[in-house]
Amino acid sequence: MTAPRTMLDKLWASHEVLRRDDGVSLLWVDRHLVHEGSHHAFAKLAERGLHVAEPDLTFAVVDHYAPTRDRGRISDPKIARMIQTLRSNAARHNLRIFDLDDPTQGIVHVVGPELGLTLPGLLINCGDSHTSTHGAFGALAFGIGATEVAHVLATHTVWQRKPKAMRITLNGQLGPGVSAKDIALNWIAMLGTGGAQGHAVEYAGQTVRDLSMEGRMTLCNLSIEGGARFGMVAPDEVTFAYLENREHAPNGPDFEAACRTWQKLTTDEGAVFNSDVALDASGIAPTVTWGTSPEQALPVSASIPNPDVMDPAKANAARDALDYMGLAAGRALDGIPVDQVFIGSCTNGRIEDLREAALVLSGRGAKVPGLVSPGSARVKAQAEAEGLDRVFIDAGLEWAASGCSMCVGMNGDLVGEGKRCASSTNRNFRGRQGRGARTHLMSPAMVAAAAVTGTITDVRPFLQGRAA
């Protein structure tokens, strides 16, 4: 009798070509996503006179350096060169490229799912750590380095050591104003940025089942901030409803057959995980980071902790973080002034995220400037069709084009030195949004509330009497 298997076991076995004596597996890659930062890997191919092994399974996306304004004339020569290099490599290897003027352009981890390139059971690689996003569909998805990108381009396989299996089970109903972003920041704050190190995280439980695909993508996207190799959610009816009629998904009888196959990817009853964590989601509040690591996060109603009474292993990091952030222990998070806000990124730039932010901003003005960058051209078009763009513009925020934008600051969208930003992005490391920038991570709805008050503030009072 076959032993019960986890979803990780099933996905890994279905892609394993061979296993070396040291336990490292050679895995077949179903989708390879490349962006401007992949130029090093293409250069390695050119040095060896190699071509892309599977051009039909390799997709190029302009996102990291994509300007969110004046795309017709890029003034920064470095940005223009990076984008042109990707265009040249895509043309040389006959790759489908989602360029700046493409109606399906956007952030790679938004474009893949919305076009149906991301499907349950696939192995998806990209030279970007947040490739974990695609795991929300029951895919084996993880970021790889430049050398690995070159290997995948040349062979469409990747060498990987199988991670341990970890399950985070969430049950309980989320309260008003609490989202997948808050779930992720909550567990990372509890377990630490190394809490899932060496593991693949499978999210389970009724709370996860109740999340939309957008919410599941946010959860899997942030898995790596807790040290995980990647995150996953087993495919179900929510997954299938999202994928039906997507361009690159099966259709008709083929789709129905695919759904029957995808349903078998779930973890078997009785399967054993290396680590099992159970959380009560009903106790999670809107959460915000106070330091320079995603684990330095607390409910918005809390006060900044005192490093003197913290675990000695984390005390010095906390002191350094507070010094960089210009904050003091004991200060309430609610009420800390912000200089600007940002809504977007592969974590929170989807249509659901924009709707949640617009719900808070509707009929209200922003006290601080801010930028809203949709996750893709399609999200932008849909938001405009729903009138969300007018809500942001009328509030005083800037409505821009799609791209990684202020999350990484590679395209010129930056937070000024010493300025404080309420951001819906995924990382609050030193200088992440620009030299000397001070970043507070939170949900899009919380960012919207910060825009209205000019301070970090609890979003829940802003939602009273407003239907989602």
Image: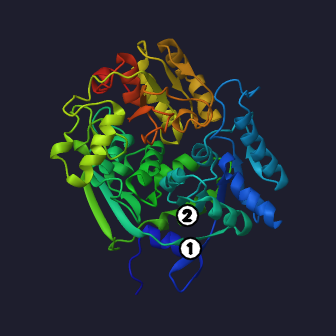
Visible residue check, residue 387:
no
Q: Which residue is mark 2?
A: 121
Which corner quadrant holds the N terminus?
Answer: bottom left
- Which one is nearer the viewer's eye here, 88 or 464? 88
Residue at 33 percent of width and 47 percent of height: 295
Label 2 sits on what residue type? Gly
Which corner quadrant holds the C terminus?
Answer: top left
Residue at 44 percent of width and 67 percent of height: 7
Residue at 32 percent of width and 21 percent of height: 462
Q: Estimate how packed mark 1 is, as few (under 14), some (14 to 19) or many (20 or more) residues with alpha carbons within 10 Å.
A: some
What is the image's colouring? rainbow
**In the displayed structure, would residue 203 be above or below residue 189?**
below
- Which one is nearer the viewer's eye here, 464 or 129? 129
- Return the disc, 1 or 2, that comes first in the chain's sequence: 1
- Which one is nearer the viewer's eye here, 86 or 373? 86
**In the displayed structure, would residue 433 be above or below residue 315?**
above
Label 1 sits on what residue type? Ser
Q: Is residue 281 left or right of residue 239?
A: left
Label annotation for residue 188: none
Query: Do the CB atoms of the residues marked 1 and 2 lie less than 8 Å apart?
Result: yes
Image coords of residue 330 (percent x, y):
18, 32
Image coords of residue 324 (percent x, y):
36, 35
Visible residue check, residue 440:
yes
Q: Estimate how packed mark 2 is, as few (under 14), some (14 to 19) or many (20 or more) residues with alpha carbons within 10 Å.
A: many
Residue at 49 percent of width and 21 percent of height: 370
Q: Is residue 342 left or right of residue 58?
A: left
Image coords of residue 72 (percent x, y):
76, 26
Q: Is residue 463 left or right of residue 115?
A: left
**In the displayed structure, would residue 319 be above or below residue 332?**
below
Label annotation for residue 14: 1
When asked about the image quadrant of residue 169, the answer is bottom left
Report, in whole angstroms, how far the alpha carbon at label 1 lies from the one at label 2.
Answer: 8 Å
